[in-house]
Image: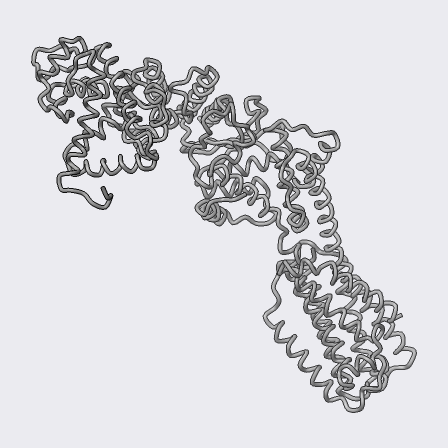
Amino acid sequence: MPLSRKSRALTTRALSELQLAPGMLAQDVVDAVATVLGKPIFLEQTVDERFKKTTGSFALTPDFALIVFRGIDPQAYQMHSLFHELGHLLCRHRECSRPGTQLETEALELVLWSEAEREAEFLAFKIASLISRKSRSIQAFG
Amino acid sequence: MMRELATLMLYLTGLILVLRAPYALGVRASRPGWLAGTCGLIAIICLGFVVPVPTLDAAMGSMGYWNLLGATSTTLAFHFMYRAILIHTSKGSPPYYRRVLGLGIITYSAAFTMIAGEQNRFTSVEAFIAALIRQPWTALYLSIYLSLVAIIAALSLAAILSSANRSKIFVAGFSLVVLGNAVDVVLLWMQHFNVVSMALSTLLYSVYVSAFFSGAILLCLGFLRGSVRSLREFCTFLAYALRLRRILGRAGQDKRPLLDVARQPKIACYQMLIHVRDLVTLKGFALNTPEVSLTQKADALLIDSPIKSST
Amino acid sequence: MSEEEVAPSELRYLFLALSKEWERSILEHAEARDLTSAQVEILLVLNESGPYSMQDLGQMLLLNRDPFRSVDSLVAKGLVERGSGEDKRKVLWSLTAAGAEAAADIVAADLSLLQNFVGDLPTESTAKLVNLLRSLQGKVPTLGVLEQRFSAQQSPMHEVLAAASSTDLQVNRSPIVASRLRQTLELKNAGEASAAFAKYSPQLAERGIELPFRNWVRLLENGGPVSRHVLGELSDVLTGNRDYLSTDDENVLKDVENHMRAENALLLAGVTGFGGRGALDAGALQALAELVQKRLNDGA
């Protein structure tokens, strides 16, 4: 997905702060982001119907960050939503506004509708690809 | 027996070269393995079973350098194999290693040049040894070369044994190479000093050939195991990615270019799976039963461990 | 005459001729109410940002800096009324309902005249003309006054020239706008008028709208006068929805109000930042606020 130059610089900086290694688990990534953020990140799996059109969300307080993802989703989708919210935290996004009225805007369009959302989505995919790389040890023979 | 074993080795090293070429081109850590295969292939060719030794020798100026090329290629094949083992076990080589390697190659090469007599008449290594082993330089050349290979194999074995993942196939392979070469060094000096009977000489030589070539074949299989696993993973993700691509096409979405999918099928599979799930969750797109099954299987393939809520 | 040549006194007389004709037309329109140019100006100023004391009103006028007689005349015509207080210098003067209606008529007439005068010029030429005049105004002391008067009524040039009537462009006074604006600020815990102004006027300024405090207070009390363009921008700044402050659509109102309540719940829970993937509607925000509160309670 195309990012502006400013967004590319921001996301590159965010990733370099993390130092993601191949084979890391999702929890390891959460811990790494918590270290960068300087506060704990709590994960909350929910089945609340009110998250019907929201695959994941985050809330930041002075003492902690909370990331909510949906228990009904398949694992890869949960992980992606989690990484998307971690992307928001890494980019220090404060408030992810939505367009005028969401009644006319499809939930799918809202995933990429602002620069902040595109940055977070880009980071989500990037984090996933970095941790799924083969380690150097495996690369020697495969 | 040597011919059969050498032929098997030829196919295995050829397979290594072909399978590992894409990785070697793109991934630095994969290159030593590929170079080991290349050097191994050259070494086998120098045995004379594919290209007759006289033809090989003629191409190199009829000075008998096919022999030295074979020895150097074998040495380098084990050297690169050792480098691959070090990457695999995340270990480093001893500080003296490069010096020993360089000195060893130079020394046995120098010894080879000191061997007297015409060498363009030999059609095999055995014929070369039988004719010239009484010369000290021949014994020195061969024993330094064999010892150097044995040392490199021993270092590889030590690296494997000191790592968490002790691959049995590599342990067996390197052990057999060390054993085989050790036996051959003893045999060569016995032959040089003419203190071995024909029967014992034949027996010891068979032990060397069996041990060394079995060991080398096991090492090739060890190498190939990783490559085959990788290839299987590549093909699996490619298949899933292509099917996910079809689903996206059915949903009226832009299809990812096939070249992108083929280059990195695992990443393409993941990204398209997310896209499909977004369509289902956020746009209400309906998957049919086979498509649901596909997405579930792709999900299981991609993710090993579930995410849990914080306590 | 060549556009590269001009006579020394020509430009002054061009301005005079045009403004005289325009004034004449406006007075002709206002003839039923028997108003002078000075009285017309007072009506408009009081409509835009009154009430004023006599002294402050004088500061806002171009035609007559001592409006005492004109104000008296307007009071006699039932268009202006005085506030309480004995000292005439401190008393505040404001429009009556008839005065507000008269002011709206004059604005409508001004629009019609504007469209007649420049309607056949290309929009870009009109925009250049306006910008040139504004920059020339910089050489005289009156620029600040005109900016204060007209910044809340700005609309894009092409909309002004194409408007069928002034009500297409402007809301003169609207109790609905006023009440909705007050409710929004309350929902967002924006505080008193001055605190809310301090918070949101910079955001409006980023969008090229310099809204004076007086006009802000008028909006809160009367819901105008304000251009629909500025109202839309303000609505967008406050709620993310351009139509909220002026719409009748119940769905939009409900959606935006629920969203604001949910955001408020998050802020009350101490949240300094939030976001989500997908719709993040009012329900999701409310659920998020509850989860944060639960986590805070567990921690406590």
In the picture, residue B297 is in which quadrant?
Answer: top right
**Left or right of B188: which side holds B159?**
left
Quarter of the image where the C terminus of chain B is located: top right
Count up the numbered dots. Answer: 0
Q: Residue at x 66, y 37 (%)?
A: B248
Asked if one can make out residue C50 in the rendered structure from this viewpoint, the answer is: no
Q: Position of residue B286 (x, y in %)?
A: 67, 28
Q: Residue at x 50, y 39 (%)?
A: A118
Quarter-of-image position of residue B202: bottom right
Identify the image's colour scheme: rainbow, by chain, secondary structure or one colour. one colour
C151 lies above or below B64: above
Q: Is residue B308 above or below residue A136?
A: above
Q: Position of residue B292 (x, y in %)?
A: 71, 31
Which x, y percent locates residue B214? 82, 65
Using residue C236 as the reference point, say whether residue C34 is left or right of it. Answer: left
Quarter of the image with the N terminus of chain B in it: bottom right
Above or below, comparing residue C136 to residue C146 in the picture: below
Q: Nearer the viewer, residue A88 or B187?
A: A88
Q: Nearer the viewer, residue B118 or C97?
A: C97
Q: Kindly give the residue lying farthest to the right in the view shown.
A: B199
Whether residue B13 is visible, yes or no, is yes
Residue B124: quadrant of the picture: bottom right
Residue B6, given in percent of the width and then of the height, sits at 84, 69
Q: Is residue C117 above or below residue A127?
A: above
Give me the residue at 85% from left, 67% from top: B5
Front residue of A22 and C104: C104
Give the farthest residue toward the front: C1
